[in-house]
Image (cartoon, rainbow, N blue to C red):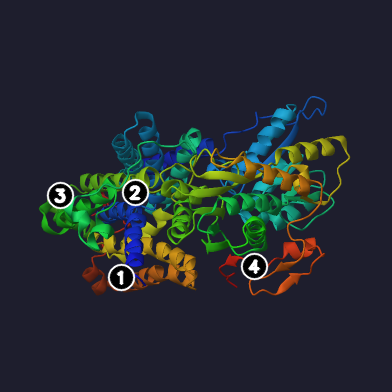
Amino acid sequence: MTQEFLITILATAITAGTPILFAALGELLTERSGILNLGVEGMMLVGAVSGFIFAVKTNDPWLGVLAALVGGGLMALIHAFLTVTLQANQVVTGLALTLFGTGLSGFLGKPYIGVPIENAFKPVNLGILSDIPFIGPVFFQHDQLVYLSYIVVPVLWFLIYRTRLGLNLRAVGENPASADSLGVSVYKVRYFYVTLGGMLAGLGGAYLSLAYAPTWLENMTAGRGWIAVALVIFATWNPLRAMLGSYIFGGIDAFGFRAQAMGIAIPSFFLKMLPYIFTILVLIMVTRKAMANRVGSPGALGVPYDREER
Amino acid sequence: MKLSKKILTIVFTLVLAVALVGCGSQEKPKAAEEGKKDAATDKLKVAFIYVGPVGDGGYSYAHDLGRQYLVKEMPDIETTIVESVPEGADSERVLTELAEKGNKIIFATSFGYMDPVIKVAQKYPDVKFLHCSGYKTADNVGTYFGRMYQARYLSGIVAGKTTKTNTIGYVAAFPIPEVVRGINAFTQGVRSVNPNAKVNVVWTNTWYDPAAEKEAGKSLLETGADVVAQHQDTPGPQQAAEEKGKFGIGYNSDMSKMAPKAVLTSAVWNWGPYYVNTVKAIKEGTWKSDQYWGPISDNIVDLAPFGPMVPEDVKQLVETKKQELIEGKFDVFDGPVKDQTGKERVAAGQKMSDADMLSFDWFVEGVEGTIPK
């Protein structure tokens, strides 16, 4: 395996993993606040289509990104209203939002299928950084959204583990009643992070339609939202591990295709299965309370909070 | 308090559901008043079910172009579409619903609808079912498909003439006979004009994942191919070619719009004329159940217009070959045909039978890659 081959695989793993990464970060924040969001796929699609429409109309991809954030955020706001205020079943609501988002994005995007986009995000060199041997071509010859993800990941990590805001977030996800008694507004925190999570899912969708593909086709996320949900468990609710996980999930396809193209026989189904096996192992682990605390699984995940039921 | 929240939740979910239905089917027939079934004034109702969204820019899109052609040619009929219908049990429900709503002709456009079609057809003997790409028939069920391999052969000629590296990539969905036949026909076309070229195959194991299929196209272009063909339901591989400044051959429908600098031509489905003929025959009562595998002479498969980069002599050559195919002077798998190991599979002077073509499970000489078992 030559070095050039390795560089291509790793660089592709990053671009292929970035849409999953953004969505997974969003889901991670949402789940940290104790709300399960199974609508990621729908939110990504709404983000992808609204981003694409605005980028085409205004000829500015950054306005597209803004529209994707708003689109994904609005979808998540519906989720927050249903699950936080109305205390609806989070699984059902999430699934409904995925169906809704798929239909809505298909409807909105109909006139934009196959429309070429002039100003898609393109790789930007970062001067010295991009010239570092090996590291440069792998990490620093991508588009701006990838660089944005490099910033978002450590910021979120710092937020969750090193700030008072993060402590509140974790408390709300772990034991909302205790957090409430200490004066943390459970509703506000949950509304905020569910919405933020949807915005990040929208951004993940926009990465597909504005940088990776870049085009709009119905249902173009092709299940990446679900991978993001699995990935959060894989990453045990930690942004840094989510980053690593996204690149593994993304890199597996890239590696499989290139191995085939070079005539190396690789059992592609087996490769695709690996991350999920690990996800299942983590799921088994977190069924034990002691283990769950250690890996950071939010204790109140999926349980609606009602002040009157204390 | 508790109760009102519950009610609000239900109302909200209902609103979402209704909005979803509103988005899903944009071609709703104007609700023909039930009970007023006056044959003279009622329009003939024809329904189509698609496996993907019409917006896939590929397979289902091509079928819908056919439907639009039908509506234009026969304005006195009324069509309904249902898109993204999963193969299997779900399609049975959709088929029943469409028959129940008074559709007299139903086109089921994907292979996996086969058994549901047969089942539902037994319950509605006065409804005609046309199933695309299957092999089971009944008195009111016919099958239809086109000899896409002939168009693929022609597109192979263009690829063989274009390649400079003598390596052509082929992004393929699943190792089923239809896909294998396409790869083989394409390769026959390539090798008819360029015996040194090879066709390198990558399997994606998806029909519909634009990003992954683009990635597969890229991997071929990065490992030496300078033209990439495909058997997928999306234009992903062509967009990879566009990005890399290389060439691509589209499939399903004309993909030049999605990758204008890359697409040499596309092997396309042209379902319209078949839909018109079939609906007319059923209307006039001359239709009989059969298994239709339409050749290029029926115009059911074709090549999309060439891109501006294709030289005149290549266009001429393809045109000549197309004419010969139409007139039946030769077919794609006329012997001698050798497999990858060099073993002769079809002897000189022999023709390959339809049965053999429909069960292809080996690659012809010139294909690089394996068929996963």
- Determine whether A209 is above or below B367 in the image: above
Q: CA distance from mark 1 to mark 4?
A: 53 Å
The residue indicated by pointer 1 is: A286
Chain to which mark 1 belongs: A
Mark 1 crowdedness (10 Å alpha carbons): few <14, some 14-19, many ≥20: many
**Are marks 2 and 1 in one subunit?**
yes
- Viewer-nearest of discs 1 and 4: 4
* First in sequence: mark 2 vs mark 1: 2
Is residue A124 among what the camera can see?
yes
**Are marks 2 and 4 in one subunit?**
no
Residue A285: x %, y % from top left = 31, 73
Chain to which mark 4 belongs: B
Is residue A192 or residue A212 the one in the foreground? A212
- Viewer-nearest of discs 4 and 3: 4
The residue indicated by pointer 2 is: A204
Query: Amino acid type of disc 1?
Result: Val
* First in sequence: mark 2 vs mark 3: 3
The residue indicated by pointer 3 is: A184
- Viewer-nearest of discs 3 and 1: 1
Picture quadrant where residue A43 is located: top left
Q: Judging from the image, what secondary structure is the residue with disc 1 in?
A: helix
Is residue B13 or residue A119 the one in the foreground? A119
- Determine whether A48 is above or below A170 in the image: above
- Determine whether B276 is above or below A154 in the image: above
Residue A170 as seen in the image, left or right of residue B15: left
Residue at the location (23% across, 57% down)? A173
Image quadrant occupied by the C terminus of chain B: bottom right
Which residue ends up furthest to the front in the rendered image? B313
The residue indicated by pointer 4 is: B365
Which residue ends up furthest to the right in the rendered image? B286
Mark 3 crowdedness (10 Å alpha carbons): few <14, some 14-19, many ≥20: some
